[in-house]
Amino acid sequence: MSQLNADLHCHSTVSDGMHPPADVVRRAHANGVQLLALTDHDTLDGIPAAQAAAAELGLPLITGVEISVSWQEDQTVHILGLNVDPQHPALRDGLAEVCRSRDGRGREMARQLERLGAPDPWAGALRHAGNPQLISRSHFARYLVDIGWMPNTRTVFEHYLRPGRPGYVEHAWASLETALAWIHGAGGVAVIAHPACYRLSRRAQEALYARFRELGGQGIEVVSGSQGVEAISRIAQVARRYGFLASRGSDFHGPGEGFELGRGPLLPPDLTPVWSLWGY
Ligand code: AMP
Ligand code: MN
Ligand code: MN
Ligand code: MN
């Protein structure tokens, strides 16, 4: 059913979202979401609390994770792993290693921001992190808003935290091959998150789609709160050309940062939704 109000991409305080997992689930339910996946960055630690809250409400929940991947020429792309076994050892161990590397990256980011004059940015970022095991640029961004460097996180990213800016730290994430091996090993389905957001040439985009499919990747986010509605028809064409299953997700982090849970256009009706794999 392509017209289901499914939201298969959102974040909790376990990564860089602003609400604890159970609150995210309750908010999704209140917004009319019919099928939900919590997809925190590089961690599955929010899944048990989300499952408990979803069971209480009778809201179907798909397990999920959004894995950070380094793809060609130091580009970062995000791959969702949906319906993964959250206990699968290779996936868990792999993600734990990514979180450790995030810690080192965050400390380097803190050093750079300190040189720019921010007082104790590491402690500042930690104050915004619901889970000290998962430090993200978002936590630094919120701290820099706190201390008045910029009016909002979007402008912090623009001036300090994106590639080429003074607080940006290059980082080697998992390879596409490794991330897909983790997802498939854990019985899950891989989905390219917000494909319209990457600064890739046409050629590099096609190479990503082709390699992803070659590795057994099946899905692409056609509707995403992060990429805007104008991308829908273009990405829907990609789904048709490559035979990808279509996904839909708000990429909700909190009020005022992007889309609300379960809001936004439904999938174009001719596409096969990724949730058809699970009988919805
Ligand atoms: P990280 O995984 O630590 O590199 O942080 C990436 C996260 O930063 C994304 O998942 C978004 O939540 C957030 N982010 C990236 N770019 C922006 C932006 N331009 N404005 C606001 N948040 C952003
Ligand atoms: Mn995020
Ligand atoms: Mn993302
Ligand atoms: Mn996301």
Image (spheres, rainbow, N blue to C red):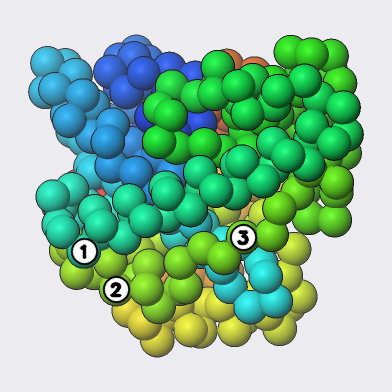
User: 230 above or below 36?
Assistant: below
Q: On the rendered structure, is 216 left or right of 266? A: left
Q: Which residue, given by chain and number where applicable, does mark 1 sit on?
A: 90
Count of labels in the image:
3
Three-letter code, disc 1 = Ala
Q: Which mark is residue 181?
A: 2
Residue 63 on image: x %, y %: 23, 43
Residue 50 on image: x %, y %: 23, 26
Residue 178 on image: x %, y %: 37, 73
Q: Distance from label 1 to label 2 (Cα)? A: 9 Å
Q: Is mark 2 within 8 Å of ligand 3?
A: no
Could you classify mark 1 by the number of other residues whose Cα lies within 10 Å: few (under 14), some (14-19), or many (20 or more)? some
> In percent of the image, x 43 and y 22: which residue is there?
130
Three-letter code, disc 3 = His
Q: Is mark 3 within 8 Å of ligand 1?
A: yes
> In percent of the image, x 21 and y 24: which residue is there?
49
Q: Distance from label 2 to label 3 (Cα)? A: 20 Å
1 and 2 marks in contact (CB < 8 Å) = yes
Mark 1 / mark 2, whichever is N-terminal: 1
- Determine the secondary structure under disc 2: helix
* Residue 176 visible within the image: yes
Q: On the rendered structure, is 155 left or right of 175? A: right
> In percent of the image, x 85 and y 49: which residue is there?
165
**On the image, which quarter does residue 80 sit in?**
bottom left
* Residue 9 visible within the image: no
Residue 113 on image: x %, y %: 79, 35
Q: Distance from label 3 to label 1 (Cα)? A: 21 Å
Could you classify mark 2 by the number of other residues whose Cα lies within 10 Å: few (under 14), some (14-19), or many (20 or more)? some
- Determine the secondary structure under disc 3: loop
Q: Which mark is residue 171?
A: 3
